[in-house]
Each structure stands twice: as C-alpha cells, then as structure tokens.
Image (spheres, rainbow, N blue to C red):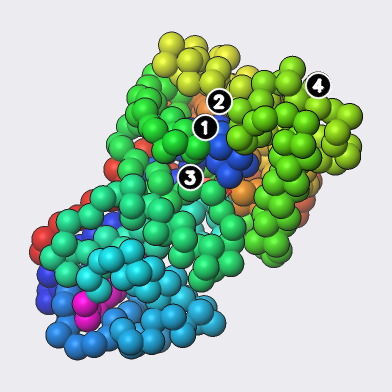
C-alpha cells in the first residue's frame, strides 16, 4: 500500500472462535464465542467525493461504489459486503460519506472463523469513523447481521457479528441471543491452551445447508407451538422436548434435541470454565461435537476425523467443530507443553485418513473492535 501514510484512521474487527453453543443462536440460545487476534483491518479516510472506493491488500482490483446506487451492488463478489453495510447503515439513520477504504484481512477465508463478520463490522465502524460519528457496537452487530442476510444470502444468527463487535481480550462472551444480554467470562486456561485447526476441505454449499438447518428448527418450533406455549426452542427443557416428541417427525426431533441439549451444555460449560474445572469443560466440548455429528449432522468426515484424533490424544481435554460446520475448523483444549506433539499427531492421522493437510492457526483472544487515529 504505497499511500498508507495518507489514511486518517485504522479500524479493525475480529474473527471468532466459538467455544460452545453451536447452532443455537438463531433458536434463542446462549453461545460462548471469543474474538480472535485474526481480524480485518480497514485503513480509511474521507475522499470528499460521492463514492466509496475500496482496495484490498490481496486483490488487484479497485471497486468504486456510487453512494446513490448502494443497493445495486448485490452481485459483486467482494464489495457486496461493503455496499450492503453502507446501504443498511444509512437506512438505520446514519450518515454515510465518501471515503477510501483499504482492506487487509488476516482471518482465513472459508475457515469458518467469520471473516465475513469481521469485514462487515470493521466496514461499519470505518463508515462511522470517517463520518465523524460515534457508534454503538450492539447496533453495529445488528446491522452487520442484516447485511449478511440481505447481501450475502446467509440467514445467520447474531453470534459472529456480536462477538466481532463486542469481544474482549482474554474473555469469552456468554451471550443470550434472545435478549442480547451478555456476560464476559475470563478464559483462564492455566497450563492449557486453545488450538484451532482447519480441516482445509474445500467446502461448498455451506450457505444452503446452513439455511436448510435453520428452516428445519423453525419448522420444529412451529409444530411444538401448536401444542405448547413457548417462544423459542432454547426455552424448552430436555424433559419438555421429550413430552413433545410425538408431535415431531424423527428428523426434526433430532434437530430440536441438539438445540435443547446444547443449550443445557452451555449453561454447564460457563459454570465449569468459571470454576476452572477444565476437565469437565473438555467433556462438554466432546459432547457438543457428538451432538453436532449425530443429531444436527453438520460435521462431515473431515471435521469428525480432526475432532476424534484430537480427543484421542492424551494432552487434549476436549475438541469440537466450531462455527457453521460442513468444513472449517475445530477448537481443542490442549496442554501447552505438549502442543507440538499434539499438532504432529493430529496432522499425521488426519492426512492419513482423509488425504487433506490440516492447518493450525496461532491466535490470541483479543478485543473485537479497535479504532486508531493515524
Ligand atoms: C455461523 C453463523 C452463526 C451461528 C453458527 C453456528 O457461524 O453465522 O450465526 O449460527 O454458524 O453456531
């Protein structure tokens, strides 16, 4: 970036790893994600024109978005996110002014660590910053989620955008997705560390399968509501779901059972993490993966192989897929002193069983949004 010195601000927003509470955010459940030091950084400056000009560190092109036609860029591969954010930020009553944005993303694309949330959140903060306006991180998360729905076509929950905008270094967020109430929980792992491993399976159809799961649990809720007054699946106890079993086709029952039991695991995981009981916490990670594999069916051979290899290593207290699934990453709780041996073992077994090469990411639990004046 030759003219780096002329940007007025640098803002960044984080990718995330979810510790537990998978596929429950859109069912009103609680989740427990952490913001990562893998992030999208936007260098920005006002340009005095009626356009947003975007460049990327790793792409040759420059895209120019006309502020009067922001809704017309949905077909653009990369810039649809920025166009969507700008259009929706303005629709929410904020000022959007002409600016230059230079994007530099260290969240690996397609890894399931929420590069798109990091891009959306950092873009919104950049727009507010160049317009000289303050922003509310919760509103930023909600508008970013809307951009994902309307411009990227993924009917996602609020988890990724929320933690990207509100994450705090060294902490997981225990977020109630029904109310957006949150509590920061210190991630104090002592002699253990989190290891994030990418299965590197070229995944396709994630969006359509994700939207399909979401439709299934919405249908399950609709059927249950014919018999029972309940606002969301997360509000059911396992016993209450059992009592509704006859009202649901077998597949929808399995989907709902995952949601209800995963919500219960999140409650227990928060307690065990706060109490420093990492052994119990690790068991909950394993149980979460098992449920995502057998009941929710979002893991697949590669993530199963990675998680099972990790779980069988003596230095690992627990391992599970993280994010939407159908590819992407696992998160494992591993003894620091044996991390090297753990990685070697998992990589070798994974390559042998699947033919793919796993990639390990080094990342800290970081703040969600960082803004700096240059
Ligand atoms: C994706 C979505 C989130 C959440 C997870 C699964 O990351 O963007 O909203 O549903 O999948 O927990």
Choose top left, top right, bottom left or bottom right for residue 226: top right
> Which numbered mark, 3 or 4, is in the foreground of this view?
4
Instruction: Identify the residue at image location x=31%, y=37%.
Output: 168
Horizontally, is 128 left or right of 158 in the view? left
Find residue 80 and report its horizontal and vertical position in percent: 46, 76
Which region of the structure is painted magenta? 97-106
Dot 1: element: strand
Q: CA distance from mark 3 to mark 4?
A: 29 Å
Q: Earlier in the sequence, mark 4 or mark 2?
A: 4
Which is more foreground, mark 4 or mark 1?
A: 4
**Which residue is identified by label 1?**
30
Contact between marks 1 and 2 (CB within 8 A): the answer is yes
Q: Is 310 colored magenta in this rendering?
A: no
Q: Secondary structure at mark 3?
A: helix
Label for residue 159? 3
Question: Disc 3 to disc 2, how far (Cα)?
Answer: 14 Å
Overall secondary structure of the magenta section: strand
Task: Name the residue beneath numbered marker 2.
Answer: 266
Disc 3 residue crowd, few under 14, some 14–19, many 20+, Cα 10 Å? many
Instruction: Indicate left or right for 241 with 316 as reference.
Output: right
Q: Secondary structure at mark 2?
A: helix
Distance of mark 4 from mark 2, alpha carbons? Answer: 22 Å
What residue is at 80 percent from the left and 22 percent from the top? 242
> Which residue appears at 13% of the width and 65% of the height?
132
> Would residue 208 be found to the left or right of residue 247 on screen?
left
Q: Quadrant of the N terminus?
A: bottom left
The answer to whether 89 is drawn above or below residue 24 in the figure is below
Check contact, mark 4 vs mark 1: CB within 8 A.
Answer: no
């Amino acid at each position: 970036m030759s003219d780096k010195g002329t940007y007025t601000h640098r803002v960044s927003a984080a990718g995330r790893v979810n510790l537990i509470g998978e596929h429950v955010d859109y069912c009103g459940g609680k989740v427990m994600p952490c913001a990562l030091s893998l992030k999208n950084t936007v260098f920005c400056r006002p340009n005095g024109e009626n356009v947003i000009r975007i460049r990327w560190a790793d792409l040759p092109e420059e895209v120019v978005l006309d502020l009067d036609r922001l809704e017309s860029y949905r077909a653009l591969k990369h810039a649809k996110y920025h166009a969507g954010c700008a259009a929706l930020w303005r629709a929410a009553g904020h000022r959007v002014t002409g600016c230059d944005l230079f994007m530099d993303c260290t969240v690996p694309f397609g890894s399931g660590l929420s590069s798109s949330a990091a891009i959306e959140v950092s873009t919104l903060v950049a727009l507010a910053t160049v317009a000289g306006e303050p922003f509310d991180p919760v509103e930023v998360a909600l508008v970013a989620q809307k951009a994902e729905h309307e411009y990227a076509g993924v009917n996602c929950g609020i988890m990724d955008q929320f933690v990207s905008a509100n994450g705090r270094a060294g902490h997981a967020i225990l977020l109630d997705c029904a109310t957006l109430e949150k509590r920061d929980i210190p991630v104090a792992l002592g002699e253990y560390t989190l290891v994030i491993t990418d299965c590197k399976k070229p995944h396709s159809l994630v969006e359509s399968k994700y939207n399909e799961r979401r439709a299934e649990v919405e249908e399950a809720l609709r059927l249950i509501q014919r018999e029972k007054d309940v606002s969301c699946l997360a509000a059911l106890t396992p016993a209450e779901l059992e009592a509704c079993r006859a009202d649901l086709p077998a597949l929808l029952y399995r989907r709902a059972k995952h949601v209800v039991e995963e919500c219960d695991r999140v409650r227990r995981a928060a307690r065990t993490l706060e109490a420093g009981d990492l052994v119990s916490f690790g068991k909950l990670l394993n149980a979460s993966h098992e449920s995502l594999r057998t009941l929710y069916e979002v893991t697949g051979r590669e993530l199963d192989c990675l998680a099972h290899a990790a779980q069988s290593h003596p230095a690992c207290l627990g391992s599970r897929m993280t994010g939407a699934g159908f590819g992407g990453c696992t998160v494992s709780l591993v003894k620091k002193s044996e991390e090297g041996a753990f990685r070697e073992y998992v990589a070798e077994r994974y390559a042998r069983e699947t033919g793919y090469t796993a990639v390990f990411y080094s990342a800290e639990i970081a703040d969600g949004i960082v803004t700096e004046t240059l």
